[in-house]
Amino acid sequence: MRISIGTVAMVATTVALVSCAPKPPGAVSVIEDKVYTVTPESIPVAAGIVVGELTELKVTERVEQGSERVETPAKLSGSLKLRNTSNDQTVRLVAARIRYIDKDGQPIALEEARTEPIIQFSTAKSDRLDPGQESTDAVHVDFPAEALKQDMLKDIRLEITYLPSAFKQETVNLAVSIGGQ
């Protein structure tokens, strides 16, 4: 049996067209962001001489539309603005840890293989605050799935670690004269 070159070309073209054809609508999974708002919209922060606020907080998880299968676990995001209120101390911000507290006052644990919710102040601009200075950092940390259940989450606890150091500014008067005129 002989196969002509035309037959081979026709078969190859058919295979190429079939493999490039769009998949049926039932086979395509649509992933969407499911966003949960956090109330209140702005939360004041006060830790010794460091004050500020957490703003724009929201929890986002990516889920498969229809099946509600979680594609990407929940993350808490927002903005953390801090200010050094001291007149005479510089503050070196080390880290901030977030704890999720349930209705009974107990911490809500993250699932296995999730990262502990820690905010690192890693840039030179945001890790040192002289008296009166401010910094703003993005918050993007893991959020426990358990806390998404109705009435489960009561508080978000922010534990800030910082190192204060003395900041001194003095004035010295130097006696001078201009000679020779």
Image (cartoon, rainbow, N blue to C red):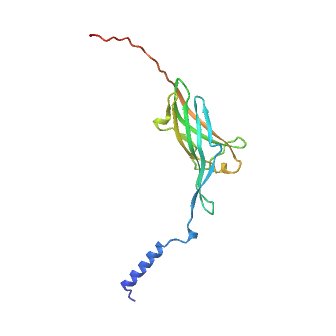
- Looking at this view, is 117 or 54 the one in front? 54
Q: Residue furthest right?
A: 104
Expressed as whole percent of the image width and height from the top left, the position of residue 119 reads: 54, 40
Q: Is residue 42 above or below residue 67?
A: above
Taking the view exactly as shown, the residue that stands out farthest to the front is: 181
Where's the N terminus, which quadrant? bottom left
Asked whether, in this view, residue 21 is left or right of residue 64, the answer is left
Above or below residue 174? Residue 91 is below
Quarter placement of the C terminus: top left
Task: Where is residue 153? Give x, y as percent.
Answer: 68, 45
| Residue appearing at x 37%, y 86% in the figure | 4
Q: Residue 106's quadrant in the figure?
A: top right
Q: Residue at x 63, y 41 (%)?
A: 99
Where is residue 126 drawn, in percent x and y? 49, 36
The number of callouts visible is: 0
Picture quadrant where residue 101 is located = top right
Q: Is residue 156 above or below residue 67?
A: above
- Outermost residue on the bottom side: it is 1
